[in-house]
Image (cartoon, grey):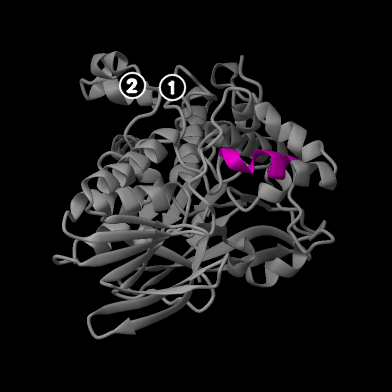
Amino acid sequence: MPQPPVFDVLGVGFGPSNLALAIAVTEYNAAVGPEDVVTAHFLERQAGFGWHRGMLLEDATMQVSFLKDLVTLRNPSSPFTFLNYLHGHGRLVDFINHKNLFPLRVEFHDYFEWAAEKVDDLVSYGHDVVSVRPVTEDGVVTHFDVSSRTSGGEVEVRRARNLVVATGLRASLPDGVTPSDRVWHNRDFLQRVEALDDPRRLVVVGAGQSGAEVTAFLHERFRDAEVCAVFARYGYSPADDSSFANRIFDPAAVDDFYAAPEQVKRRLMDYHANTNYAVVDSDLIAELYRRVYREKVVGAQRLRLLNLSRVAELAETADGVRVTVESLSSGARTVLDADAIVYATGYREADPTGLLGDLAARCARDEQGRLRVGRDYRLDTDDDVLGGIYLQGGTEHTHGISSSLLSNTSIRVGEILQSVLDRRAPAVPVQPAYAISASHPG
């Protein structure tokens, strides 16, 4: 059997994180001689690039600055910056006049697609990774054979010296809830909402940004429908996007978090969870409140906020869903017959070891059963595994709140690439112009 193609870096998944890594590799290779080039390839199960397509609402904006794009914090002079994208599309001056740090989400997705097209020679779409097998030499794991199944059912094998796993987050639904044509996670929102035909009532579960966005969208889109938002909180809580709190997303904060004792890590997550989790932009909160108040004034309430409540029972009917909402304070129950229910209940980190097969047993875990991860995002394995397995995501317990967010993506991929370079023999110094290893941009 012929040996499969061998790569220095093989990426599993091709969302924004591994896209940023592909760009970092491309820029590095452009600055070194042929003998020092890093060979890389990426496998993505989707037919093309896509990032949270189900929530690309036309008016929704990003929650991070455009400067936290795929490259700027690592290499401000890169041709892959969001500003260069705007310039190429003839919108740079218009964007500047807009006086806004936060682009539309659909625009940032278009930027991602624009960047992905420029490195599409490094990615194979329509490839679902089905297994990772260690390749041993004298008892030492030197490579990984990665098998992927194409959309046509064929299995292809590629060999890697290093893996970078970036398979994203998994939609989280409450126990016992199964998605269907009437029961959705907001991940699939836009695809599902098109099938609604003159709905009478819609229910949204969740008090975070996605829940508020879905609620506002449905209320605006279906002018004859009642929209019921159900959440356990008393009201929507504003996101803390103040300047000092936002420093929890700085590259230097990753160093602080990684070095901190476990009890300090927990405190930091508790202190600053309201920068990201179950919180809503203040402008959107104000808009929803205006709508509720306006409807009270005119005496035609379509937007109902069922706060301090939970969905106690859910049953599908012949033409919709029957939702039983229970008050957490009084225990009183309200039955809502609805056309559909949308769960904006967040995401959970995927366990990367599910792909690793026998290699999973060779990955070290801490006292709480969590994967041990080095500062360079490399899994801590036994000494006989020479190949590196890196994680983009699934490292919140070690690297902090920004581990699955865009804020540090450009810096993180530079650190991963630098680690790959440092661990190969002989080590190749990174060209200063690209500042791959810089974790504290000036």
Q: Percent from the top left, x then y, of residue 34?
A: 51, 31
Question: Which residue is label 1 attached to?
Answer: 78
Label for residue 260? none
Question: 199 left or right of 380?
Answer: left
The kind of secondary structure element at disc 2 is helix
Residue 4: in magenta span: no
Amino acid at dot 2? Asn
Q: Is residue 45 among the parts visible in the rendering?
A: no
Q: Earlier in the sequence, mark 1 or mark 2?
A: 1
User: Residue at (56%, 59%) from the top-left corner?
Assistant: 348
Q: Is residue 272 above or below residue 164?
A: above
Taking the image as shown, residue 192 lies to the left or right of residue 350, namely: left
Residue at x 62% of width, y 66% of height: 356
- In this rendering, is residue 93 above or below 426? above
The amino acid marked with disc number 1 is: Ser
Report if the CB atoms under discs 1 and 2 are less than 8 Å apart. Answer: yes
Query: Farthest bottom residue?
Result: 318
Q: Which residues are magenta?
A: 268-275
